[in-house]
Image (tube, grey):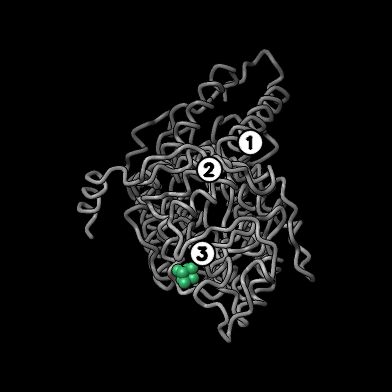
């Protein structure tokens, strides 16, 4: 896209983000230190990638979770919260536990999607080690297959308290 | 510059220089997280987002300061290097003529000293990347040193071109001369050197198109790759020092392009004006960089030397022209 066309598109579209809603009513989760600033690391423990698409939308321009102080980062060392999607497969069990260990405290683990909560449609599969809560402590669960971006945003806002 | 002859000039100018330097460090340190906030906010708005506001980086820093760092076994420099980096960034900001051209007589704000301090910070972060012992850390360090090796000569040559008409390689003298003779700002020598300087500052501070500050792809990372293993308080220092460095270098370029507002004499009023001037200049420069970045993609790593070679050629032409024109 040429520079001019891009500039015109930016001017034409203006603001794409959905209007902000009121701060969440559910109780806040996680340490007070995380108020207003939560770096998020996403871990795919064996998902079908449906949840990933919704997480992509959450941090896209329309749902814009960054306006509430949540930001995706590239390393668990930088993170305060882990978004875990999918059933925990045998192959991803060790990496998941290591990622949790590599996240400095205070940290929050969010299980996103029915798979992460109770194995969902993959329950009983031969490659499944269990749901996320079977292998590590989970602070928030977001139901849905896949969960709506609004629900994921609401879960993140319980951590950022904004 | 114009110490009144009634007072002992040396002592007063030393005290005054110290005051200006301390103030300069404080102002820049306070402004740099807000600068990053403004730059990110400009980008968010152009992407159609609402964005978290200009205070988000400050909030991030305050949170990181309260988090315990996690250190992998065998890693030694994790706690030291972030502090060293912050030290070099503060030293850099102290040496640059951002607010006042009255310097401490004993401390040279010479071009070569400044480039040396710049390189010191680069080495510190490269060691941090190597020390983490991960593949990405080492890769980031090697890339960073490659870019630094191409950037430092251009910084030297570009500012050298500006120093030839002035006859001094002290940065404050260059800024002074530019205020005295505003026409020199738009001379071909100055324009060539400024463009070269802007390109190398962009490369040095890891902005697009040389490095993408918001990338999640480890294979394309330069700056981010070196700090992947830093966490908690250590990460806070690393982030703060690179933001401070960016603010300082943007301020230097802004002061060379628009030298007005810098305090030239020892007066409180002049210093107050200088604070406002440098904050406005740095913010505008940052917003401009962020707006241009929206239109850029990261270039392939092997294309970076071409970009930097072009900037070196411009700096070299500036030097040549300064001998011919002046
Ligand atoms: S919850 Fe549904 S969308 Fe998400 S990983 Fe499981 S099957 Fe896929």
Q: Is residue B139 left or right of residue A103?
A: left
Do residues under tags 3 and 2 come within 8 Å of each other at their CB atoms? no
Name the residue tied to disc 1: B25
Q: Are marks 3 and 2 on the same chain?
A: no
Q: Is mark 1 within 8 Å of ligand 1?
A: no
Above or below B276: residue B142: below
- Nearest to viewer (mark 3 / mark 2): 3
Name the residue tied to disc 2: B247
Q: Nearer the viewer, residue B99 or A93?
A: A93
Residue drawn at x 45%, y 31% is: B280
Residue B77, given in percent of the width and then of the height, sits at 75, 62
Output the chain of dot 1: B
Residue B61, given in percent of the width and then of the height, sits at 63, 44
Above or below A102: residue A161: above
What whole-number distance in Å separates the C-alpha atoms at marks 1 and 2?
11 Å
Q: Nearer the viewer, residue B13 or B19?
A: B19
Residue drawn at x 63%, y 75% is: A130
Q: Is mark 3 within 8 Å of ligand 1?
A: yes
Residue drawn at x 43%, y 28% is: B260
What whole-number distance in Å separates the C-alpha atoms at marks 1 and 3?
48 Å
The crowd level at tag 1 (other Cα within 10 Å; few <14, some 14-19, many 20+) is many
* Residue that sits furthest to the top in the current view: B6
The crowd level at tag 3 (other Cα within 10 Å; few <14, some 14-19, many 20+) is many
Q: Is residue B317 left or right of residue A4?
A: right
Q: Nearer the viewer, residue B64 or B33?
A: B64
Q: Secondary structure at mark 2?
A: helix
Output the chain of dot 3: A
Q: Is residue A27 left or right of residue B153?
A: right
Name the residue tied to disc 3: A113
Q: Secondary structure at mark 3?
A: loop
Q: Is residue A22 visible?
A: yes
């Amino acid at each position: 896209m040429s520079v001019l066309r891009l500039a015109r598109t930016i001017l034409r579209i203006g603001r794409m983000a959905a209007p902000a809603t009121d701060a969440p009513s559910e109780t806040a989760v996680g340490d007070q230190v995380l108020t207003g600033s939560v770096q998020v690391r996403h871990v795919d423990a064996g998902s079908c990638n449906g949840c990933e698409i919704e997480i992509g939308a959450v941090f896209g321009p329309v749902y814009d979770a960054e306006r509430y102080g949540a930001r995706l980062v590239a390393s668990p060392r930088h993170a305060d919260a882990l978004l875990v999607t999918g059933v925990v497969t045998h192959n991803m069990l060790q990496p998941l536990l290591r990622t949790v260990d590599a996240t400095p405290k205070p940290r929050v683990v969010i299980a996103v999607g029915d798979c992460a909560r109770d194995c969902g449609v993959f329950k009983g599969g031969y490659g499944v080690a269990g749901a996320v809560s079977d292998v590590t402590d989970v602070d928030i669960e977001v139901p849905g297959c896949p969960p709506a971006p609004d629900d994921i945003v609401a879960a993140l806002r319980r951590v950022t308290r904004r | 510059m114009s110490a009144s002859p009634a007072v002992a000039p040396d002592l007063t100018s030393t005290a005054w220089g110290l005051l200006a330097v301390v103030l300069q460090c404080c102002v820049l340190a306070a402004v740099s997280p807000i600068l990053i906030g403004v730059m990110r906010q400009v980008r968010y708005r152009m992407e159609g987002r609402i964005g978290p506001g200009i205070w988000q980086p400050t909030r991030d820093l305050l949170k990181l300061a309260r988090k315990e760092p996690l250190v992998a076994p065998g890693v030694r420099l994790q706690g030291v290097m972030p502090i060293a980096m912050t030290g070099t960034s503060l030293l850099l900001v102290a040496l640059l003529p951002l607010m006042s051209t009255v310097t401490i007589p004993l401390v040279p704000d010479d071009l070569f000293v400044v480039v040396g301090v710049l390189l010191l910070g680069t080495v510190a972060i490269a060691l941090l990347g190597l020390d983490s012992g991960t593949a990405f850390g080492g890769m980031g360090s090697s890339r960073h040193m490659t870019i630094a090796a191409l950037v430092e000569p251009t910084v030297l040559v570009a500012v050298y071109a500006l120093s030839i008409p002035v006859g001094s390689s002290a940065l404050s003298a260059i800024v002074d001369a530019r205020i005295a003779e505003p026409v020199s700002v738009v001379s071909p020598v100055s324009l060539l050197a400024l463009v070269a300087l802007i390109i190398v500052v962009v490369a040095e501070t890891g902005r697009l198109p040389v490095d993408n500050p918001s990338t999640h792809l480890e294979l394309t990372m330069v700056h981010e790759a070196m700090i992947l293993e830093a966490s908690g308080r250590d990460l806070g220092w690393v982030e703060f020092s690179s933001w401070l460095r960016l603010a300082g270098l943007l301020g230097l370029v802004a002061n060379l392009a628009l030298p007005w507002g810098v305090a030239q004499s020892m007066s409180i009023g002049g210093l107050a004006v200088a604070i406002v001037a440098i904050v406005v200049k740095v913010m505008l420069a940052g917003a401009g960089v962020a707006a241009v970045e929206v239109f850029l993609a990261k270039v392939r790593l092997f294309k970076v030397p071409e970009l930097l070679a072009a900037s070196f050629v411009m700096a070299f032409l500036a030097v040549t022209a300064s001998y011919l024109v002046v």
